[in-house]
Amino acid sequence: MKRIKSSQSIRATGTPSVQKTWRWIYFLAMALSASVQAKSLVDSKHNLSASGHGINASRETHICIFCHTPHVANPAAPHWNRPSHGAIYTPYSSSTAKATFGQPTGSSRLCLSCHDGTVALGMIISQAPIPFAGGMNKMPKGRPNLETDLSNDHPISFTYDSGLAMLNGELNDPNTLDSCVNLDSSGMIQCTTCHDPHDDLFGKFLVKNNAGSALCLECHNKEYWTGSDHQASMATWNGIGINPWPHSTETTVADNACSSCHTPHDAGSAERLLHYAEEEVNCFTCHSGNVAASNIEAEFKKMSIHPVASTTGIHDPTEDLVNSPRHVECSDCHNPHATRSTEATAPIASGALNNVKGIGSSGSVVDPLINEYELCYRCHADSIDRGTAIIDRQFPLTNTRSEFSSSSASYHPVETIGRNTDVPSLINPLNESSLIYCTDCHNSDQGPNAGGIGPNGPHGSVYAPLLERRLRLTDEGNESPMHYALCYKCHDRTSILNDESFAFHKKHIVDEKTACTTCHDPHGVQSTTHLINFNLDYVLPFNGTIEFVDEGALRGNCTLTCHGKDHNSLTYEP
């Protein structure tokens, strides 16, 4: 630590009253620097004197004078040496906030007399303005300059009491705060709650070492955070791409914790204090293969995706789960404070969807969701803006909640076991009592479920609509394991082509080159068995009728025109 000049050498000349003033400032500086020898005020960026290491005065050698004076202070309590200014600030706001935020008060307003960039750094009360090196005047642009728009900074100057903690639900009672974390005399959060302007031991003048977000967690008590993947991960950055922690000296996800996604100042996304305005970019800085093992960012560059990059700033934690403005963001499906790498068995959701809201089979909100399909129903069920079907069917239905309903005549067993008790084509270990996930069909084409090494999940696929494997949706194509790979994942190809479940499967699929989806609707059909719901691009009415009639096990008849042939109650049987 640099030695501070003695009181005798500080002012060798001047009147007795001036000498007395500077002796007082000297002793104040000594007291402050003695509090922590490792990183005192003298060696910090708050030393604005000519001996400092950052923004410096050109000639002034005294340190405390830039903030304090023993006489004519304004206000008196901290012996403040900077003039009042009339800046009007834009405070932080949030749809989920329970506190009321207004104009900065107390010590926060004093800090802002430098850190809002509106007043010259050398403008003080006790003497003429102090010139700065290089003609520097006000705080330069950058993170330390918060400007007057505080909407993208952590809120300040609000009352933090036990009532607020109870109302919020994810704040600790302020009576439990560490002794180094202090509210002001009115019980308000101020800049000095987190920052000690005289002590830079922990960097950024923090009052506490923030490794693992220990300082953040003094106040914030995020549900499910303890034990979550992000709280425990020891993954590090490989040095490629965007630095996920540009303002931190910590090197692991666990040690950066909250600051992996959030920043208390100059946030790109104001309301959630995220690093970047584009929600997905906050995830991609790690989930690009440069910190997390899997490259999920690359999945969203495929032909068929959940379009997370199409909207910005629309998602909100308080939004209508079904009919909010149409969008999808990573946090619609994942709670980054709660996600866990735990597997489950259908229909139970895996840990990746831990503590996320969903829509149940009855159409009501489930919080948190239990089953995976409850997440899908948020957008793909009752939403009035869910879009049209990609296949023009005899019985058009795009509400997946209705399609998979146990009251439907036939459905893939997503909610409950299927109605058909005789499905000879099922591949072991599947049987007629099995349940499946939506993601058994809609998933990455390069994930482990598809036999690859990429990430699982319906982020993106080369096969539309977000299919794990190829499924030809049009007629006139040769049958092959590749063209119908999705169906053959669960249904044995040999069994199908040997007509074990339908007498004319081979004739239709191989001879007539009819796609599986020309006859079958893979989600479910409310009125017909065996998922029969004809594709009207290929199936036409016969004498005004398109009809399939189930006549019992492996038997039925059709009335329609297809592949150039009229079917007039044409019967199929073994």
Image (tube, helix red, strand yellow):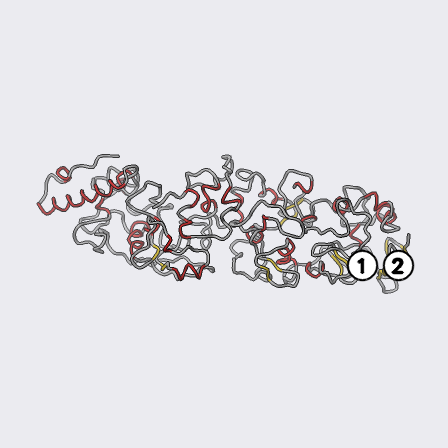
- Place residue 284 in its image quadrant: top right
Q: Residue at x 47, y 50 (%)?
A: 274
Query: At which x and y percent is residue 354?
Result: 57, 51
User: Label 2: which residue?
Assistant: 557
16 and 348: which is toward the camera: 348
Q: Residue furthest left?
A: 16
Q: Is residue 534 visible?
A: no
139 and 400: which is toward the camera: 400
Crowdedness near tag 2: few (<14), some (14–19) or many (≥20) residues, C-alpha within 10 Å: some
Amino acid at pointer 2: Asn
Q: Quadrant of the N terminus?
A: top left
471 relative to 409, above or below: above
Crowdedness near tag 1: few (<14), some (14–19) or many (≥20) residues, C-alpha within 10 Å: some
User: Label 1: which residue?
Assistant: 529
Give the label, 1 or 2, closer to the camera: 1
232 relative to 220, above or below: above
